[in-house]
Image: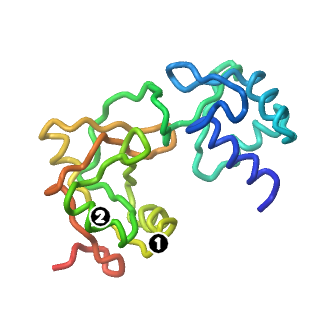
Amino acid sequence: MGSLDGLSIFLSQVLRHKPEKAHVTLDEHGWADVEELLAGICSTGRKMDRDILEEIVATDKKQRYSFSQDKKLIRANQGHSIPVDVELKEQEPPEILYHGTAEAYLDAINAEGLKPMSRLYVHLSKDVETAVKVGKRHGKPVVLQIRSGEMHRDGQPFYLSENGVWLTKKVACGYFERMDILSGFPPG
């Protein structure tokens, strides 16, 4: 893992979960002052300046971070485990979204539905490929097909993050089914 990867992982931890690790405070919308963040990261023995930070933001494959228009503030787009309001606007989702998980979690999901666990929202993707990648991070991948359009019509709010991840507070049992990843269809 290159040094930029390591810095990006630390940045993600600070902006989503533990701002105190870099001696920064996030405002109610998850924004951190860039100068305070850079000083805080450097105080941990890591080397980071504005150029490195801008490179991390620009090259992050998942587009995890956003700068304010004047580039004086930075925040993670979603994935927080600390209570922040990243000012998401409710949006109508596509009819179908997908959730990647691991087979080991299926019994709990089938019993209780999808819950945000340590995060503020359940994360959903618009394509199967992304859901498979997410599931692989946790073990043997399983993809759940979510009837998001039906959920929305039934009153469940959905939000679209800056980096294209769909978010909702929960997915109740009855709104999802396991997909056969190889065929792309629910088992029949």
Residue on which the image places disc 2: 144
Q: Amino acid at mark 1?
A: Gly
Residue on which the image places disc 1: 139
Residue 147 at what x, y percent from top left? 20, 54
- Does 117 sit left or right of 5 as displayed? left
Q: How many other residues sit within 10 Å of disc 2, few (<14), some (14-19) or many (≥20)?
A: many
Are circles 2 and 1 on residues that touch, CB within 8 Å? no
Q: Amino acid at mark 2?
A: Leu
Residue 145 in the image: above or below residue 88: below
- The mark closer to the camera, 2 or 1, is 1
Residue 143 at what x, y percent from top left? 34, 67
- Does 145 sit left or right of 65 as displayed? left
- Does 35 sit left or right of 101 as displayed? right
> For residue 30, which quarter of the picture?
top right
Q: How many other residues sit within 10 Å of disc 1, few (<14), some (14-19) or many (≥20)?
A: few
> For residue 14, which quarter of the picture?
top right
At 40% from the left edge and 68% from the top edge, which residue is drawn?
102
Residue 110 in the image: above or below residue 104: above
> For residue 182, which quarter of the picture?
bottom left
- Does 161 sit left or right of 110 as displayed? right
At 47% from the left edge and 66% from the top edge, which residue is drawn?
138
Residue 5 at what x, y percent from top left? 74, 54
At 82% from the left edge and 31% from the top edge, which residue is drawn?
50
Q: What secondary structure is found at the residue carrying circle 1?
A: loop
Residue 59 at what x, y percent from top left? 70, 48
Between 129 and 6, the one lying in front of the other is 6
Q: What secondary structure is found at the residue carrying circle 2?
A: strand
At 14% from the left edge and 57% from the top edge, which residue is drawn?
174
Q: Which mark is residue 100?
A: none
Q: Nearer the N terminus, badge 2 or badge 1?
A: 1
